[in-house]
Amino acid sequence: MEITGIWYNGQSSRGEQVTLRLSAAGHLQVENAGEMVELEINKLSISTRLGKTPRNIQIPSQGHIQCDDSELLDSWFPKTSVIEKWVDWIERRRSAALTAAAITVAGVVLFYFYGIPYAALKVAPMISPKIEAMMSEQVMNVLEMSSVDESSLPKERQAELQAKFKALIKGLDRESEMKLLLRDAPGIGPNAFALPDGTIVVTDDLVKLAKNDEQIVSVMAHEAGHHEHRHGIRQTLESAGILVIAAAVFGDVSGSSLTVSMPMVLLQNGYSRGHELEADDFAFELLIKRGQSPQAFADMFKLMQKELGDVDDGDDKVANYLSTHPASLERIRRAEEAAKKMKK
Ligand SMILES: [Zn+2]
């Protein structure tokens, strides 16, 4: 129960090796080559514990004793200030603190990848259709800049496709919100997209590119999947992050800042890979239910890919929203697998 230290008495620069002990009376005994002095603890002061640095015991008018840090010192010298106690507590739990920090970081990362999409999934149904409508209008406004016009397909052809769309979505949860817009939009080529309010846009070029109506319907099924799964709102919430989700839950959902920022987020980021795959799965299931093979989706996808090429222009907002990326090959493969399963 003793500590060794070096006493710098303030008169010579050389220190003398000493042994420290606590006496029965509670005094600090300092032994130096057989000589012993007793010092009253409450007249001494000790430097704060700071990592592994040596501690200094100040002795009034007799210099100081430097010694390695030791648990004993803490039991001998009562803590004076709250801050000192607190710093000491943290120091002693340095590894615990680091562990806590690591857990926090891991938590944030997990939350980012799983928590936010989950929160978005749960919050999306609470967002009023009015918000979805406002977002859609603004997305449409942006798209209209790349000249989206009324379809130039013959009226009978349009009616035919409208009827096929109605039959496809019949009985879906959000059927009443969905409507098909056929549009002449040379700027975006053979394409289709779903707006958050359930509007599904299919371009004339896509209709013309398709080899048969099943291919067109398969794309409609995919877009219907985006609406059924509320991907418009979910994607926006996920991209905008937890603050917007919190605002949507606790704040004024009709708040203008929310609706203004949402369409831009959507246009800039497009749908995530996860959402695309989810919409694909929805489409395959729906097509099979309607007695149609998902092979049509794979075929249409191949045609679109060939026609559109790599729509991977990072700066083009419209291209991002319409992009069939990422992993188009993977999506074709999945469609073909779904088709094979159907045949069995
Ligand atoms: Zn999609």
Image (cartoon, rainbow, N blue to C red):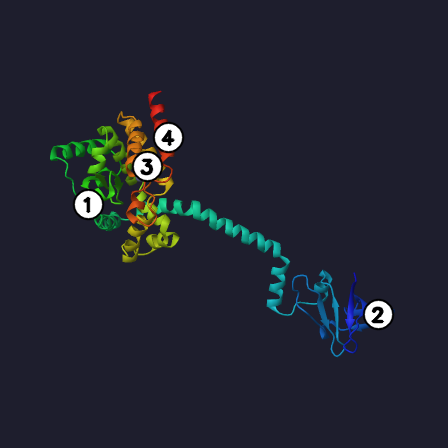
The residue shown at (75%, 79%) is 61
Query: At x 17% / y 34%, what residue is drawn?
Result: 162
- The residue carrying mark 3 is 279
- Which is more N-terminal, label 4 or label 3? 3
Say if 260 sits above or below 48 in the image. above
Q: Position of residue 231 (x, y in %)?
A: 32, 43
- Tell me the amino acid under the disc marked 3: Ala
**Residue position marked by numbered label 1 in the rendering:** 148
Name the residue beneath numbered marker 4.
Answer: 333
Q: Helix or strand or loop: what does disc 3 sit on?
A: helix
Residue 198 visible within the image = no
Earlier along the polypeptide chain: callout 2 or callout 3?
2
Q: CA distance from mark 2 to mark 4?
A: 85 Å
Which corner quadrant of the image does residue 344 belong to?
top left
Instruction: From the viewer's perspective, tell me whether residue 158 is left or right of residue 226.
Output: left
Mark 4 residue type: Arg
